[in-house]
Amino acid sequence: MIEFMQVNKAFGDHPAVKNLSLRLEEGAFSVLIGTSGSGKSTTLKMINRLVEPDSGIIHFSGQDIRELPLLALRRRMGYAIQSIGLFPHWTVAQNIATVPQLLKWPKAKTNARIDELMALLGLEPDLRARYPHQLSGGQQQRVGVARALAGDPEVLLMDEPFGALDPVTRGALQQEMRRIHQLLGRTIVLVTHDIDEALRLADNLILMDGGEVVQQGTPLSMLSAPGSEFARRFFGHSELGVRLLSLRRVADYARPDENVQGEPLADTLSLRDALSGFMTQRRTVLPVVDSQGRPCGSLHFSDLLREEPNDARAP
Ligand code: ADP
Ligand code: MG
């Protein structure tokens, strides 16, 4: 859906993005990750032409973005950033309606869209008439995302959207974004420097360093096979193991044997959660239950060390 072909961008004589070639597939949740200054935001801003490349070509749905009228291009792309930039003298409803207003949608359609998005983002209807300063940070961020989605864009671009939030609110919004992505199947490109956020959200992870792509793949493939010493260090040598556990599900590693003692593990939990279950209960085998709470097997401590999930997965 979005393709960079040998794209370069420098500010003065300082290269920000170097000879970048990158494909972002339609419908995928792509996450650009890397240390500060690695070129993530510059890459993102070149997609909606907030920054113009010095050389190279960027395609959007098979078309060179320079050949599309700027306004038409931006309308097809929602953009949400950390310093959300809500209009302070506009209410929540007016803020969300920014793009529908520009597109001159009929009032009823705009109102319905505001209601729909507020429900989608978990914003109570009575917040409609509030002003941004009357909202919590998490609510402001939700309004920012609702506004970015309002014109029903084909792509949602997000730059450190949850950066300023406390860990609990941040976790809740991350879950919300995963759910919205699954529900709408929209293409999302998100920039972050937070490794756990990236691992939680990405279908497709792009690790950048010094304006270049170091490695690209699923979170699981990146953690299980870091392609370089830089990648290994970046994902945290010592924490690589637990991060890998957090990407694996109990359901895929459980055994069929039952009648095991202990506080059961839900099969939807990650192996990281299972690890803390083993530690807090001081047991090496725990029963596993399905989403209805029915016993469906057991997990052994040694299963955490297995490289491969079960061959015969439960249907
Ligand atoms: P990231 O988002 O990964 O932190 P950026 O893409 O913002 O990195 O920046 C990449 C490099 O380009 C950095 O060295 C940054 O200082 C520089 N840079 C980014 N934007 C500008 C700008 N508008 N003017 C000058 N230098 C910039
Ligand atoms: Mg940035």
Image (tube, grey):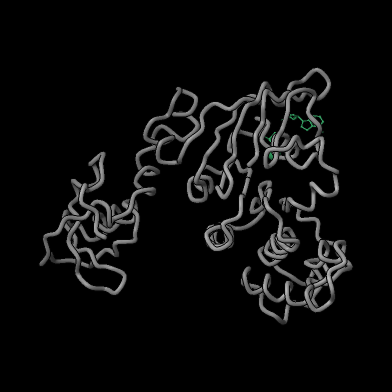
Question: Residue reaching furthest bottom?
Answer: 126
Give the total of numbered labels: 0
> Residue at coordinates 38% horizontally, 49% vertically from top-left?
246
> Residue at coordinates 80% horizontally, 79% vertically from top-left?
108
- Position of residue 213 relative to residue 262, above or below, is above
Left or right, 169 with respect to 142, comes to: left
> Residue at coordinates 23% horizontally, 41% vertically from top-left?
305
Q: Position of residue 203 (x, y in %)?
A: 49, 46
- Position of residue 271 relative to residue 49, above or below, is below
Where does the C terminus fall, quadrant-wise? bottom left
> Residue at coordinates 84% horizontally, 74% vertically from top-left?
106
Q: Which of 212 and 264 is in front in this view?
A: 212
Q: Nearer the viewer, residue 75 or 261?
A: 75
Left or right, 126 with respect to 97, comes to: left
The picture quadrant for ligand 1 comes to top right
Where does the N terminus fall, quadrant-wise? top right
Q: Nearer the viewer, residue 243 or 212?
A: 212
Q: Where is residue 45 in the image (x, y as percent from the top left)?
A: 75, 39
Left or right, 298 with respect to 171, comes to: left
Q: Position of residue 138 (x, y in %)?
A: 66, 64
Q: Which of 185 and 96 is in front in this view?
A: 185
Question: Residue reaching furthest top?
Answer: 13
Q: Position of residue 126 (x, y in %)?
A: 72, 82
Left or right, 29 with respect to 255, comes to: right
